[in-house]
Image (cartoon, helix red, strand yellow):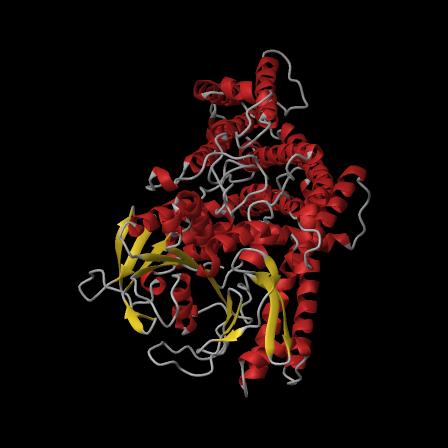
Amino acid sequence: MGTAPETLVSSVAAVDVAGDGIGRIVQPADRLLRPAPGPMLRAEGQSIPRVVEGYIWGGMTSGGAAKAAWALLFPFSLANVAHWMLPPIPSGHRLATRLGLANRSLLRLAAVLLTMLLVTQAAVVSLDLLAAQCLAPGSACLARTVPDWLREAYLVRPLIGLVPVLLLIYVLFRISCVAWETEADHAVANPPPTPPNARVLLPGTNLVADPDTPTLRALHLLAALSTVALLPLGGPFHVPRGGLAVLWAGALALLVVALLGVLLLDDPRGAHPVRAGRWLRAALGPVTRRVLLGLGYVLVALSAAAQDPLPDKLTGTDSTVEALAAVLIVLVVLFGLLLVPAALIARQEWRGRPRALRPWAGGWMAAPTVAVAALLGGGFGVGLAVAVRKLLGAPDKLPEGYEPVTLLWGAAAVLGVVAAVGAGLFAAYTVLRLRSGRLTDADAMVRLLHTGGAVPVAARAWRSAGWRRAHLHHILLTGAAVLSAGAAVALGLRLTRPVLPVWTGPLSAIGVLSLGVLAGALLRAVYNAARAPRAGRQLGVITDLACFWPREAHPIVPPCYAMKVAPELAARTVEHLREPGTRVVLTGDSHGSLLVAVAAARLLNSLDEPDRRRIGLVTVGSQLRWAYCRAFPAVLPLPAMGALAGELGTRWRSLCRGTDPLGGAVTTWDQQVYDTELLGVGFRADGTVGPLSPATRAPSGALVLGLDHWLPDPAAAPAQGRRWAPGVQRHANYTADPEWDRAVAMAAGLDPAEPTLGQLDLLFPSAP
């Protein structure tokens, strides 16, 4: 989110003390911008010196034109995220292993088709719409700008049509080559490749780089170049005559090699390079990849030169776009069907858990994610073509398959407006009901934490936040279902080609407007983000969420910052642990809690026992349990979270508010109030799961149940020596609560009334 360094470390100024400028480690600074000590920590009846450090990773997700343009690859990122949403594979289960292999293969094929679809839709705009139709000799389009003699010059129109597409392919290549380098030493570096979707003992230990990324990147680019080479020749389904047939056959052969290569990389993590994957990795070495890409560029140039002058309408664009869309739809449907038995087999992992602890959609969430990726990718291309045609002001012809897409998005826009109106009416009714002041049994925790007039205010915020956390995935599934149903109708209309009723005309017009607005708004957002840092931070929120995951299903996505942040944080921790008597507390706010959990797991795997007892963990406003464990059951399974709790014991503390719509409890669930006591189930200090002792009341008024600290919001009164934040804070200003220091002391292994050792508090910025 572009968190400022001074905001992160809660000071008026901050200064870098380590890092390479991309991953920045900062400390509070005095007036001369020198590192200053943090506030003293009261524990064990005395004041303990403390150093506060923050890690800034905003430079990896926002700032500059290049990072702003990453937003255009959001469909690719969704396809890549879907890989990490796959359900876990039980150890030794053959059917589950084969289903996992099939699902990963289908994901990779869908990803390469997304790349081909993007490049083909770009070619529809530049090669067909602009070069072939608009700039045709005698056309009224741009007649005052481009004279006829220039339109008839040799290779002018092919160059105008192909240069933007080749530039796009080059940009995709450059983006896929970017990787954040880490300065961490070998002891805490990223682990080696592991089997995909296998059970992990600690959270995030299978979050590693894919050694096949260079090969997948080359295959994606080769498929894109082959598709572009086929378009001037009539597409893959039309065999030209004469010498053009040789070029057509060569381009088709390269396309088959690319698709088979993507399919035959049987293990995308390289952990078990057997069968076809073994010889394929040897055959597709660096030299072979360069030769294949060189052949692809040569074929594109030859096909353009051989078709000069370009015809007034390229016959291959319509069939190619529709074929890619059709195959992509088939793959998405097949992926969703095969994911059902895989999720059912994986249910043994979470059978018997409360509903709030089970994976979203029963472990099937990857299917709607891929569907949305495909629909967004296709919709953006159609919207771009529609917007360019309107901009040129010419009645140029678009592929026939674009009309059902406009109808789909028009219907989706209308349904979205209807849903928004319904949600608004429901929200108004809910507000009126909440303002009535009536409290229910569900508000018992509110009454324990608040008194007087703060009770109804807090109760309204609790209900609103709880509803958002409980139904976020339902909203996502509903949106994906609406778009998928519309896609099915659009596909049926394209296949049957019926005479559409008159009333569908406005829907198609609304769809054209919606797609044009979609493309224009996204391009404008990227342009503004490149010029204005504030707008860049808004797009940085998207990349914070999408670019946490390493490249797997799709290699052409922004680089994974977790592969740099986690090892560098662990290395910094090891550096401080070299000083005798120092204890290190890793504190992660919001999305930062995921990073510190992964870093803590790697430290526990690399440190000896005495040093492991000197590290602690504080998660603040975290989505670990209610979102990440449920969306990514193979990467952050609940048993792995319990193992982390067992390793750290009482040195893991979690700060949460019931009013926080983004963060929630991490180590406890099924909370209930009996008489005047708060009870619940959760992780015990030894990592086992079971009923917990009744919550205790902290001096700040917080309720401590197990390892979770439930903070009152709004706070009852200002605390001496603490910054005052009046009103309901929800997801903000956790550091202003007096319970912050108490949780840090407990995570350091110190009684809040008694430390004798120095400690270090490492903070992470928040991201929703």
Is residue 524 visible in the rendered image? The answer is no
In the image, residue 342 above or below residue 319: below
Q: In the image, residue 354 lies at what x, y percent?
A: 68, 59
Q: In the image, residue 74 lies at what x, y percent?
A: 53, 46
**Pick the front one: 130 or 712:** 712
Report the residue that reaches farthest toward the top.
242
**Pick the front one: 249 or 89:** 89
Report the residue that reaches farthest toward the left.
32
**Pick the front one: 204 or 304:** 204
Q: How many marks?
A: 0
**Residue at x-position 37% and y-position 72%:** 753
Q: Quadrant of residue 445?
A: bottom right
Q: In the image, residue 767 lies at what x, y percent?
A: 46, 58
Q: Quadrant of the N terminus?
A: bottom left
In the image, residue 677 above or below residue 652: below
Q: In the image, residue 535 lies at what x, y percent?
A: 43, 57
Q: Is residue 255 left or right of residue 188?
A: right
Q: Is residue 675 left or right of residue 131?
A: right
In the image, residue 492 above or below residue 323: below
**Residue at x-position 49% and y-position 78%:** 714
Q: Is residue 37 left or right of residue 62?
A: left
Report the residue that reaches farthest toward the bottom.
452
Q: Is residue 273 left or right of residue 497?
A: left
Is residue 376 visible in the rendered image? The answer is yes
**Pick the front one: 765 or 89:** 89
**Residue at x-position 46% and y-position 40%:** 145
Q: Quadrant of residue 667?
A: bottom right
